[in-house]
Image (cartoon, rainbow, N blue to C red):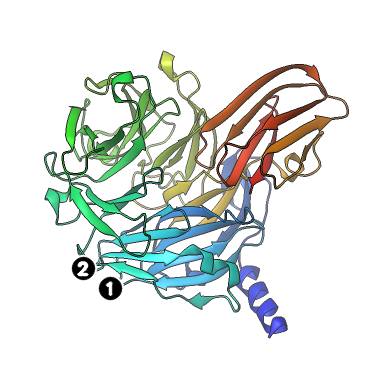
Amino acid sequence: MKKITSLLMIFSTAIAFAQTPCSGGNAAGYPCNGYDLQSNIPLGIMGAQGGNDSWGWTDPQDGKEYAIIGLNNGTAFVDIDDPNNPIYLGKLPTHTSSTIWRDMKVIGNHVYIVSEAGGHGMQIFDLTRLRSVASPPETFTEDGHYNGFGSAHNIVSNPDTGYVYPVGTSLFNGGPVFINVNDPLNPILEGGYSMSAYSHDAQIVTYNGPDTEHVGKEIMIGSNEDEVVIVDITDKLNPVELGSTNYPSVSYTHQGWFTEDQRYFLVGDEGDELDFGFNTRTIVFDLEDLDNPFYDFEYLGPTGAIDHNGYVVGDKYYLANYAAGLRVLDISDIANQNMTEIGFFDSYPQNNNTNYSGAWNVYPFFASGNIIISGDSGMTIAKVASLGTDDFANSKFAMYPNPTENIVTISSESETISKIDIYNILGQNILSRTFGSNLSETLNISELNSGVYLVTINDNTTKRLVVK
């Protein structure tokens, strides 16, 4: 059986395109700038005709990374521990019928999946099952199901509070539905918000931004077709709208994401390139005062491709740009209304036209730096060219013990340590220290939760840390 399993694993990866550096603006036929191809698994390997959203899970037990890929007929799970040789572990079939719209979010060790398929409800899958897949690819069964609604366009989550929020259902005028999943397999409906009508997508955070009046509250920023809406949903029985705003040349307010400091909110309008002839447009709102949000400025990209989903990690904005693939923007000077494209990986090399073909979603939150691109090309893994294997293994810095519980020591034989930053898997800076001129520094990390973190040393070396 072991030999058969090994052969199946080899077969499942052999027909995926493997690692190719970006050289001369090309990586195995994909246009690129600063991002290498790690691998690609086409839709056909996953037994699907269409691809859509994606998310990721990092196993807290060992730091292993998995990609979760939405398909027209289900949800695929891929072991990307070796990103150059990913293993397609199998698929959870759709609960009812096939459809191009599927979305998922992870809280803890469970993924919650919704779809616009009629009667689909919310599937629940225990991701720890991926640790012991004997004969990939398998056909999985769901571990739980919530049928309090039928179809949903999207699902939002807040891992801090243990809630998921389906949006675009038939409940609450299409606004967010509040579902408590602290007991993962027994979801509890606790209300919803209907006053601003249909929410196409949203981000929900435990707020820690510049508006001190609302620090510690659970805040939703909804992309609601023709406006951005901000709602305090801390009290699930009494949600309170704080403010709303729109912007010039509205077509379809699609999706947005906070900057790390929660001062600015970056929004994509999915229809403005078609309706107004813009190049890819990202709209930036100033949310310093949540009760009085306002349009700040906009960024226009180099192509006319339609923008879809975008996310912020550190000072970079990662955008799924349909026909133009993954685009990466430097937003470090956003306070001065400056955004600059610094790299891309075009997973849809056919063209950069203004259409709905190409990259549907990107997932840039893995501590390894691997970026998942999902959509018409199946699952593509890209990675910044300067963040190679040597940065994690054979660098000039040693980090030990790793995994660890309470302390970690970073040392070098030749370079003094001036700064250490630790980021969680969402790219949030959770610890920053500056030092003098020592070759070794020890940090107390006893207050960090179990999980995987990204450690940057002197702003030039990145290593992965596993906290037990």
Residue beneath disc 2: 118
Picture quarter containing residue 380?
A: bottom right
Q: Secondary structure at mark 1?
A: loop
Asked if the residues shown at circle 2 and circle 1 are in contact, with their CB atoms under 8 angstroms apart, the answer is yes
Looking at the rendered image, the quarter that the N terminus falls into is: bottom right
- Residue 153, relative to residue 144: is it above or below? above
Relative to 28, is 310 on the left or the right? left
Type of residue at label 1? Ser
Type of residue at label 2? Gly
Residue beneath disc 1: 97
Camera sees residue 223? yes
Picture quarter containing residue 396?
A: top right
- Residue 411, relative to residue 358: is it above or below? above
Residue at 28% x, 74% y: name it: 96
The tag earlier along the polypeptide, 2 or 1, is: 1
Dot 2: few (<14), some (14–19), or many (≥20) neighbours within 10 Å? some
Relative to 262, is 227 on the left or the right? left
